[in-house]
Image (tube, helix red, strand yellow):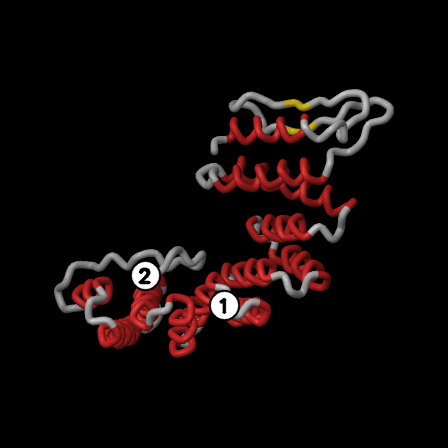
């Protein structure tokens, strides 16, 4: 959905809020695409009421989404994230236990690399919602952004205490353990998540090769040898695993540089 459609939907939500924005006048200012981002403006007359939380949340969420599309424009991205931050904070001023706004504010702080405030926000939210799996997951991803694998793994384990079969958390824990060098535990988690030992071994091998590419100062040959071992185990579990065959062939002497695949810390869809 483009920015113009998002703004039209937001306008519709505001206009259907049943007179909650103001008892006398509803007023929304929406700028052109080449101007600064849209803002909600309440009429400055007697009887004005604040925008309903659901309108503020839709506004903040829209800003957060729009910011993710502007990675090639850091200045505009920072401005949109700051507007999202203010929107989430406005909700929390009147509804401090609103869980979606808590998550949104913590996410924004993490995206802004303000990890101290992000951690404070997660701590406050989890003190009131200790069984919220998404809070634990997103906090774990924040730690992984800082390469604090131990803290990330602890958060995913906390989430799995609440929901032991949560596939997203199992995969995240598996990849985090692989980054931390705990390969046996990683295979165990990924096997549970994917239902396939071959896929688990293949993904661990792919992670090792990714680490070898991204961290050339580390022991390259030992990681490649570990990757070979996991690829062979993948083929023992499933002789028809095409990705394992491809990666093994690429590791042969004089082979072309392999396409490693996506194993970024955001944990894109793994090999199945």
Q: Quadrant of the C terminus?
A: bottom left
In this rendering, position of residue 238 left or right of residue 31: left
Coordinates of residue 142 in the picture (x, y in percent): 55, 59
Coordinates of residue 143 in the picture (x, y in percent): 54, 63
Q: Residue at x 14, y 68 (%)?
A: 253
Task: Quickly name the residue at label 2.
Answer: 271
Q: Is residue 43 visible?
A: yes
Please tell me whether mark 1 sits on a helix, a strand or a loop: loop
Packing grade of label 1 (10 A; few <14, some 14-19, many >=20) is: few
Q: Residue at x 52, y 24 (%)?
A: 33
Task: Quickly name the residue at label 1.
Answer: 165
From what the image shows, is residue 9 above or below residue 82?
A: above
Q: Which mark is residue 196?
A: none
Coordinates of residue 91 in the picture (x, y in percent): 72, 43
Outermost right residue? 46
Coordinates of residue 168 in the picture (x, y in percent): 47, 61
Please tell me whether mark 2 sits on a helix, a strand or a loop: loop
Q: Is residue 221 visible?
A: no
**Total marks placed:** 2
Earlier-in-chain disc, 2 versus 1: 1
């Amino acid at each position: 959905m483009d920015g113009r459609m998002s703004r039209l939907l937001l306008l519709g939500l505001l206009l259907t809020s049943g007179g909650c924005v103001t008892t006398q006048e509803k007023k929304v200012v929406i700028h052109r695409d080449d101007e600064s981002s849209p803002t909600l403006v309440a009429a400055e007359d007697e009887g004005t009421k604040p925008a309903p939380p659901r309108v503020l949340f839709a506004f903040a969420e829209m800003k957060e989404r729009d910011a993710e599309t502007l990675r090639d424009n850091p200045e505009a991205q920072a401005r949109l994230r700051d507007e999202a931050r203010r929107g989430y904070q406005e909700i929390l001023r009147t509804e401090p236990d609103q869980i979606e706004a808590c998550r949104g504010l913590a996410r924004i702080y993490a995206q802004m690399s303000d990890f101290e405030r992000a951690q404070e926000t997660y701590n406050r939210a989890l003190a009131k919602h200790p069984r919220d799996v998404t809070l634990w997951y997103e906090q774990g991803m924040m730690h992984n952004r800082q390469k604090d694998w131990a803290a990330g793994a602890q958060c995913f384990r906390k989430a799995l205490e609440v929901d032991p079969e949560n596939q997203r958390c199992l995969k995240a824990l598996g990849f985090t353990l692989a980054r931390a060098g705990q390969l046996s535990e990683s295979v165990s988690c990924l096997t549970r998540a994917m239902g396939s030992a071959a896929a688990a071994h293949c993904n661990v091998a792919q992670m090792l090769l990714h680490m070898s590419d991204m961290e050339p100062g580390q022991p390259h040959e030992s990681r490649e040898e570990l990757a070979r071992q996991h690829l062979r185990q993948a083929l023992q579990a499933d002789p028809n695993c095409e990705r394992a065959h491809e990666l093994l062939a690429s590791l042969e002497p004089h082979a072309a540089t392999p396409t490693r695949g996506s194993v970024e810390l955001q944990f894109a869809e793994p090999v199945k």
